Amino acid sequence: MAPKHHPTPLSGGDRKALAKELGRSRTMTAILAGQSSEARAKGEALIRKADKLLAESWNERMWSVGEPIDPSPTIDQAINGGYAWLEIECSRCRARRDVDLAALRRPPTTFVHDLASRLRCSKCARAGRRPPATLLQLSQRARHPDPETP
């Protein structure tokens, strides 16, 4: 965007007044930009806190009910809230494993409870079976490292 053109007044007093107003305008621009960035940072912190509380609430409901609950946080909400891992259990062999939500090839707006039917046990898959996984909880770090992944 091109800067606005202010025609220079002919008299000296008008030139000084224009210069003064332009200086005030530049100062206000800097002040408003600073306030905007502060408000944005506070808003992002509040959103991060809300996403964390949503993930914790879902974990508590999963613990009390024991099955995938709708509504659940989306993948990007869980990651933004600090819960980047999903703990799952194979419904056949009961092997537990952690899935990195950031590494999944799913849209970030996918709900976590929708992953239950899409995640499979890799150990049982080698044996020719494809049982679905049972979702246990969201976690902040991997608790059961998968020896198969590098």
Image (spheres, grey):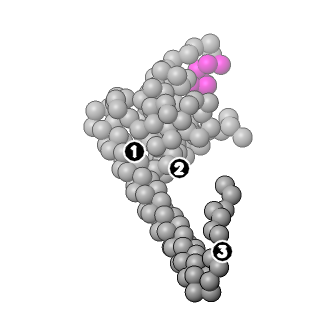
Q: Identify the residue at the far top of this view.
A: 128
- Residue 8 tag number: 3
Task: Select label 2 or label 1 by which is in front.
Answer: 1
Identify the residue position indicated by label 1 in the image.
Answer: 55
- Kindly report the distance in space between the C-alpha atoms of the residues bearing marks 2 and 1: 14 Å
Position in image of residue 118 (x %, y %): 52, 22
Identified by mark 1, the residue type is: Ala
Q: Nearer the viewer, residue 118 or 130?
A: 118
| Depicted 75 relative to depicted 117: above or below | below
For numbered disc 1, what is the local secondary structure?
helix
Task: Identify the residue at the far left of this view.
Answer: 64
Q: For the magenta stretch, what is the residue range? A: 121-126
Distance of label 1 from label 3 (alpha carbons): 59 Å
- Give amino acid for label 2: Arg
Structural crowding at the residue carrying mark 2, measured as other residues with C-alpha within 10 Å and reported as few (<14), some (14–19) or many (≥20): some
Quarter placement of the N terminus? bottom right
- Magenta-span inclusion, residue 124: yes
Q: Which residue is mark 2?
A: 141
Q: Please, what is the dominant secondary structure of the magenta stretch? A: helix
Question: What residue appears at the point 59 percent right and 40 percent down from the top-left corner?
Answer: 102
